[in-house]
Image (cartoon, helix red, strand yellow):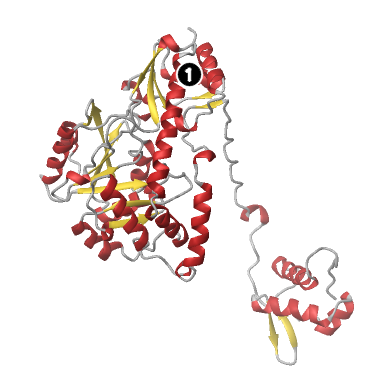
């Protein structure tokens, strides 16, 4: 008779315990194929459980194919393959996640202070969205995003960026990284893609992960060099003309016109204009986009709300020229929109009510104050006579040139020993050996101002030669 220890206080049902015991014996070979199992009544009496308990266990085993029944004869063990030895079938243990080092002061990570996020307004708009859009929230958004959000984006770009964009040209996606992958599928994996060097490293990593032909194009004082671009024989170039990361270069109109002419010279050439971080310009008017001066319709525009609202708002968008939008509908229109309708409708209300412009205005004022505070602390720190501050008029970072003979690797290492995390301009070059040295990229939006004076004191101490 089959005997299994069944514990009524284990928190698991008796039939599950019985099912697992019989299953284990079948897989181990203790119960061979075609062996008849005890009747439900006999096994229930032996184990002192109800017939229902045994019946449920038998029925689950039969449903999974471990046993079979014969009419008026009972249940029998099915022929099953015995599993490999436990040691052989156990997968190798995953390596532990790398430990995230904590720093006293982080000058690398861009983040947003919770005091900057419009919690009260956002919560109210979310409640309104739930009440007003209850049925729409249960339906899938169109492949290119909710019409209300695309129309709000179009209106904003027309009023504040001088871009005449139809809402039908806009595609909403969960982050620009996802949109990059869509563009690769749209434009073709066989194309040659060019990126800025130096540049934001994740962009190159995304292109490499899609196994496309990737070229790096150097910069001069005006931004990406068209002379070097022509040498690479690229079809598509990805750049940030309004405020390059990490150099902070703003591309002048002459260089922009050169790039537009390059795109027009040959069919199949496209410019991907990544306007990331362009909203935070503190001197003068916003820089016009390449898209707004492109008469040949060769520019694809990308932007995100991750910086202007919060990193967790994974809503980005791209704008395609009309002729390319038609190709997108035919080729990739089967993709579902990757942003929830709830977030899209909430953001649409935020923009349509003018809250987004108000929020941007407040954020610009606060970031300007924070940038000024960081620069003031640098100039009054023990490093004051050893630093030169550059490219501080736009964006959420600026550069600091350090008067030292230490190589960048030593600068970073000594800073880390003092609990300060640094990013250096040379980190963003493909060939670090030929990159400019002694230039620190200060991402100031996430800096803890209370810790900054002590952090700068530690840096001065670490870099004493």
Q: Is residue 47 left or right of residue 152?
A: right
Residue at 44 percent across and 28 percent down: it is 369
> What residue appears at the point 23 percent right and 26 percent down from the top-left corner?
220
Residue 68, image x and y in percent?
Answer: 68, 82
- Please provide percent x and percent y for residue 396: 40, 32
Q: Residue furthest top?
A: 465
Q: Residue 168: in sight, yes or no?
A: yes
Q: Nearer the viewer, residue 49 or 341?
A: 341
Question: Residue 89: x percent and y percent?
Answer: 62, 56
Q: Which residue is mark 1?
A: 377
Where is residue 261? Give x, y as percent: 12, 41
Could you classify mark 1 by the number of other residues whose Cα lies within 10 Å: few (under 14), some (14-19), or many (20 or more)? some
Instruction: Judge whether residue 37 can be spotted in this image.
Output: no
Question: Height in image: 193 above or below 24?
Answer: above
Give the residue drawn at x 21%, y 28%.
222
The correct choice, above or below, for 96 with respect to 7 in the image is above
């Amino acid at each position: 008779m089959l005997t299994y220890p069944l514990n009524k206080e284990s928190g698991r049902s008796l039939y599950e315990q019985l099912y697992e015991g019989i299953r284990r014996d079948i897989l181990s070979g203790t119960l061979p194929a075609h062996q008849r199992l005890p009747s439900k009544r006999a096994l229930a009496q032996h184990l002192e459980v109800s017939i229902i308990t045994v019946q449920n266990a038998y029925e689950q085993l039969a449903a999974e194919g471990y046993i079979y029944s014969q009419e008026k004869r009972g249940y029998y063990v099915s022929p099953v393959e015995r599993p490999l030895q436990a040691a052989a079938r156990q997968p190798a243990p995953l390596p532990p996640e790398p430990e995230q080092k904590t720093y006293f002061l982080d000058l690398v990570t861009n983040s947003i202070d919770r005091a900057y996020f419009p919690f009260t307004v956002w919560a109210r708009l979310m409640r309104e969205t739930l009440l007003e859009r209850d049925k729409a929230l249960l339906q899938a958004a169109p492949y290119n995003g909710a019409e209300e959000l695309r129309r709000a984006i179009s209106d904003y770009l027309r009023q504040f960026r001088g871009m005449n964009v139809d809402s039908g040209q806009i595609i909403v996606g969960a982050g620009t990284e996802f949109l990059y992958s869509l563009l690769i599928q749209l434009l073709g994996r066989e194309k040659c893609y060019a990126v800025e060097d130096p540049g934001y490293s994740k962009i190159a990593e995304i292109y490499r992960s899609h196994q496309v032909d990737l070229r790096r194009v150097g910069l001069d004082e005006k931004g990406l060099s068209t002379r070097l671009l022509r040498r690479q024989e690229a079809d598509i170039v990805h750049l940030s003309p309004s405020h390059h990361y990490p150099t902070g270069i703003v591309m002048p109109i002459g260089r922009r016109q050169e790039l537009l002419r390059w795109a027009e010279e040959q069919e199949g050439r496209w410019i991907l204009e990544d306007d990331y971080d362009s909203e935070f310009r503190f001197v003068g008017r916003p820089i016009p986009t390449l898209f707004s001066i492109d008469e040949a319709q060769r520019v694809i525009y990308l932007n995100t709300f991750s910086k202007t609202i919060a990193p967790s708002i994974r809503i980005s968008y791209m704008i395609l020229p009309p002729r390319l939008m038609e190709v997108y509908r035919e080729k990739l229109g089967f993709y579902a929109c990757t942003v929830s309708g709830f977030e899209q409708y909430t953001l649409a209300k935020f923009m349509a009510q003018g809250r987004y412009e108000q929020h941007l205005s407040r954020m610009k004022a606060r970031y300007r104050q924070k940038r000024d505070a960081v620069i003031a602390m640098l100039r009054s720190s023990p490093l004051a006579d050893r630093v030169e501050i550059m490219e501080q008029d736009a964006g959420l970072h600026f550069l600091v040139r350090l008067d030292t003979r230490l190589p960048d690797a030593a600068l970073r290492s000594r800073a880390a020993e003092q609990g300060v995390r640094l990013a250096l301009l040379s980190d963003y070059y493909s060939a670090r050996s030929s990159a400019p040295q002694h230039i620190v990229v200060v991402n100031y939006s996430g800096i803890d101002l209370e810790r900054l004076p002590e952090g700068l004191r530690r840096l001065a101490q670490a870099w004493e030669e």
